[in-house]
Image (cartoon, rainbow, N blue to C red):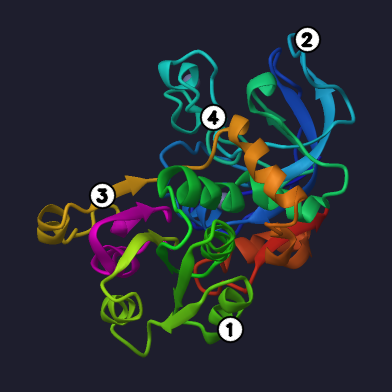
Amino acid sequence: MKAVLFEKFQEAPKLSTVDDPTPAPHGVVLKVAATGVCRSDWHGWMGHDSDIDLPHVPGHELAGVVEAVGKDVKNWKVGDKVTVPFICGCGSCSECHSGNQQVCLHQEQPGFTHWGSFAEYVPIHQADLNLVALPETMDFATAASLGCRFATSFRAVIDQGKVSAGQWVAVHGCGGVGLSAVMIAAAAGANVIGVDLDPAKLTVAKDLGAVATINGRETDVPAAIREVTKGGAHVSLDALGHPVTMTNSILCLRPRGKHVQVGLMLGDHAAPAIPMPKIVGQEIELLGSHGMQAHRYGAMLEMVASGRLDPSRLVGQQITLAEAPQALMDMDKFQSVGATVITRF
Ligand SMILES: [Zn+2]
Ligand SMILES: [Zn+2]
């Protein structure tokens, strides 16, 4: 099959021909129909993720069709249209038993712990636990975002942030995760403030339901949010993963507010300085959020089916597999409005 492969970290990936994967007894092989290019792929390529063995094929935001089924798989057949959370549970650890496959102790991540979906085919483990059926009406480019960004935001806003109607929610960083969070928090009835440095992204945030936007280049972000909200946000998300956005997110909260860290902080940013006096003195909650387990997709897909969420609005450029190496390497320099998705292989 064709796949985008890198032999060394930070060296240009190449479109290569590699062996086709075969399914594990409990797994499937999917024919990839769409796969997003995500900042996490860039982190992996930079060498920030210790799970990755070289050579490596990235790609974890995928949707496709079941191509081959392992002998122990009960619930899936060739031809089923599916996506998968980028964190796949093992099915046997205490976290999986409690329904929290997103923090499985033996988790597998396509594109990190094994070869991913920048390829014609990708193997997925523990298919009965991890696959999610897609509605017939959903196009694959939209569905690809459900594997990572959109689902990650759904968990961060709904399950971790527990956002409710009338709350003020600040979203720092309006890339794929941030814009998804704006849409989801607005659908939950919150008053959402979008923060970014790029006016074009702030315009999209407004279109997706933000009641206010703040350009971080022009103003003191926490002060501006405290002014708009008359005291601070109830819930704030760092959707980028940077010391500046993380700090702004904590400092913009009202007493007893919740900070949800969604953007990954790796490499030089792995141990940021946290404004601890405010955390203690104002009883701020610090929460991590890490993907979303397969059994929670139903709630999100119901909101998509009813029209309250429309992830198709977040699909940006559609590219070919041959264009993927450049798109991956550019991920930290230039983030386009909407997700870049590989849809031609
Ligand atoms: Zn991702
Ligand atoms: Zn597990």
Q: Which mark is residue 108?
A: 4
Q: Does residue 151 appear to the left or right of 253 in the view shown? A: right
Secondary structure beneath label 1: helix
- Pointer 1: what residue? 200
The image shows residue 207, relative to residue 125, as above or below, that is: below
Residue at the extreme front: 166
Labels 4 & 1 near each other (Cβ < 8 A): no
Neighbor class of circle 2 (other Cα within 10 Å; few <14, some 14-19, many 20+) is few
- What is the spatial separation of the Cα atoms under label 4 and label 2, in whole angstroms? 20 Å
Q: Where in the figure is residue 230, as x and y percent of width and height?
A: 29, 76
Q: Mark 4 is on which residue type?
A: Glu
| Image position, residue 166 (x, y; %) | 45, 63
Left or right, residue 152 beside residue 227:
right
> Image height check: is 236 above or below 296?
below
The amino acid type, in three-letter code, at marker 3 is Glu
Q: Which residues are magenta?
A: 240-269
Q: Which residue is mark 2?
A: 71
* Viewer-side residue, 247 vs 340: 247
Residue 335 in view (yes/no)? yes
Q: Which residue is mark 3?
A: 285
Q: CA distance from mark 2 to mark 3?
A: 45 Å
Q: Amino acid at mark 1?
A: Ala
Real-space Cα separation, disc 2 to disc 1, in angstroms: 49 Å
